Image: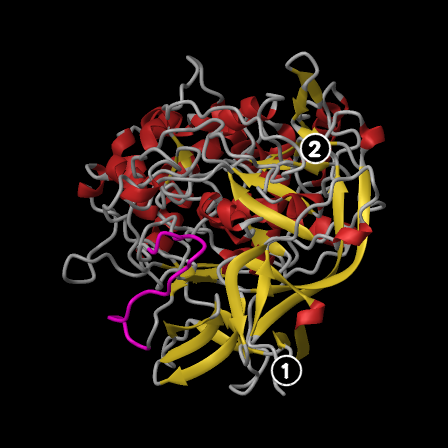
Amino acid sequence: MRGSAPDDASRTRRRAPRRSATALAAAALLVPLVAAAPSAGAGQPRSDALQRAFGDAAARYHVPRGVLLGVAYLESRWDGHGGAPSVSGGYGPMHLTDARTAVARAPEFGADGEDARGDSARPVRATPRPAARRAVLPDRLPERLRTLPEAAKLTGLPAERLRTDPAANVLGGAALLAAHQRALGLPASADPARWYAAVARYGGQDDARSGAAFARDVFSVMRQGESRVTDAGQRVTLAAAPRLTADPAQEKRLGAATAQRAAAPGGPGALECPWSVACESWPAPYEEYDNGTNYGNHDLADRPKDQRIDTIVIHDTEGSWETTLRLIKDPKYVSWHYTIRSADGLIAQHVPTKDVAWHAGNWFVNAHSIGIEHEGFLAAPDAWYTEAMYRTSARLVTYLAAKYRIPLDRQHILGHDNVPGTTPGTIPGMHTDPGPYWDWAHYFTLLGHPFRRTAGPDGGLVTIRPSYDRNRPVYTGCEKAGTPCPEHGSTAVRLHTAPSDSAPLIQDIGLHPDGAATTTGVNDTAARATTGQRFAVAGRSGDWTAIWYLGQQAWFRNPRSHPTAVDAKGLVATPKAGRAEIPVYGRAYPEKEAYPSQVPVQSVTPLPYRLLSGQRYAVGGKVRADYLYAPTFDIARHAVVRGEDVYYEIQVGHRVGYVRAADVDVRPSES
């Protein structure tokens, strides 16, 4: 949302140091990961140990094994995460929550003084950033944040073991499900259909709507089946049950309770969410303050009638759900359209999609986009996102993309870290979330648009696609400046000046205008290509592939045995014949002749990058220049300026950029 931890000493002004979640689990990792499993030699658990643990827990607590596997898949995809807590304080495959233990995972932040509106037509009056602070939990935690202590009581197992031993964690989850079944007055049936209401309670202890959505997803997973190797090397399989349905009586009762909650004050009403998710209204204020001389925290508009919506921006909150909901209510803060809770995927909508939220730091992007925040921390890689949140987010994005005809690709579904600066001076301050640990490949698989090869080696483009679990580049600055981050799967590859790991990293003169070398900092995006991004091929050498990037030839390791990119084809933009170089822009504003007298002309300032003759860049789309003039609370003074200039969005570097159609030739990459 508002940035993240520092990556080196020169950039500490952007975020105060935060503590890695790894430290929280250091002592816990002394406990064997699958204590109940027999060794397969050299002290390693058998690869079927976790599968057997699900069977043992099912037998002990009389819960159908398929139900246990389905619930765990929705919570964690069966991963144990080495005993580290999730963003919402959940541990292990069953996501047993113990927020009081996990609360020290990272400091939270409020406003940081940056202009997220990104519009020079309105004076910047940003709220100063308060000091970093730890989350403060209430005396009485909601049930969704304290399921692990309850599981410890039910099983008689120490809480420490439930946090760190996956087999014990599965036992705790089974005990909770059995307790929910009893509390509902239902028998411990061998029929998975009879566990529908208990599954809903497990996934949404505090909210019937999120519980109902969780149960629908669990039963969908059980119908289709799943199989994968976990982060600890455990092969787990859930056999498909294509004819499985929920118990009709339980489904009806749950549906009635959900409808009653929705009809209550503050219920969905005209919320813009798909029917299959839990969604609530938490509106952002549109208010004047400072005696009417300022206002916040968004702008009223009539999109897409007045301006197209063609982009969705993915953020992380850099704070807890509770902190985020408090901040969105502050008219002096900024805004975004939706927030998604990690624990269960509950969605809160804050701003109607027709209105313009202040979230991306680039007014042109804000005017054409929808911003979605996800409860999480960029620089705490072990504070993992739940599968429930990934799936809910994917459903919301699919719904919005269909509603506004937004292509489901990485040129239109951007991370906040892919949004360009508006001018050279704003580039160093642009935010870097959701960062290198957001799993774009899994996310786009859930969107129904996985990144696959679409051409042969002569296609002219590549789509970045490393194996998330296997791709583990070293990052620094998660805990404090210069120190290594925990080893973790990543969605990004590093870019070098030559086909060698020892070659220097590519330079970004916009991000480092002082000429400082690119770092391995978790926030330093200067030499980073991310999953789903498409680039034009500039060369190949053995296990290395070169792409055109920020006006340079950039190399990344792409071995045939374990490729980190797949071949693709599409449109590319190249400087027109006779042009030695062309500029790149951070916004597609109209030519000065298009502005009426009452609207100040907005300068179209080039970014510091120059694309040289013969270089090619993947085209994301064609846009006609426009500018939303909205500097006042009084919408009668707002105007949309439309120009004759046409631009192409291109993948210029880690961030997208815009080039004038008059400056480039656009042609198929294969030609």
**What residue lies at 41% left-to-right and 75% top-to-bottom?**
563
Q: Residue 61 sits in which quadrant? A: top left
Q: State the residue lying farthest toward the left.
A: 42
Front residue of 355/196: it is: 355
Percent position of residue 321, x then y: 51, 29
The disc label shown at residue 351, or none: 2
Q: Residue 100 sits in which quadrant? A: top left
Q: Residue 508 sits in which quadrant? A: bottom left
In the depicted structure, whether residue 229 falls above or below residue 326: below
Front residue of 224/248: it is: 224
Q: Nearer the viewer, mark 1 or mark 2?
A: 1
**What residue lies at 56% left-to-right and 39% top-to-bottom?**
373
Front residue of 343/499: it is: 499
Residue stretch in magenta? 499-515
Left or right relative to 32: residue 226: right
Main secondary structure of the magenta stretch? loop
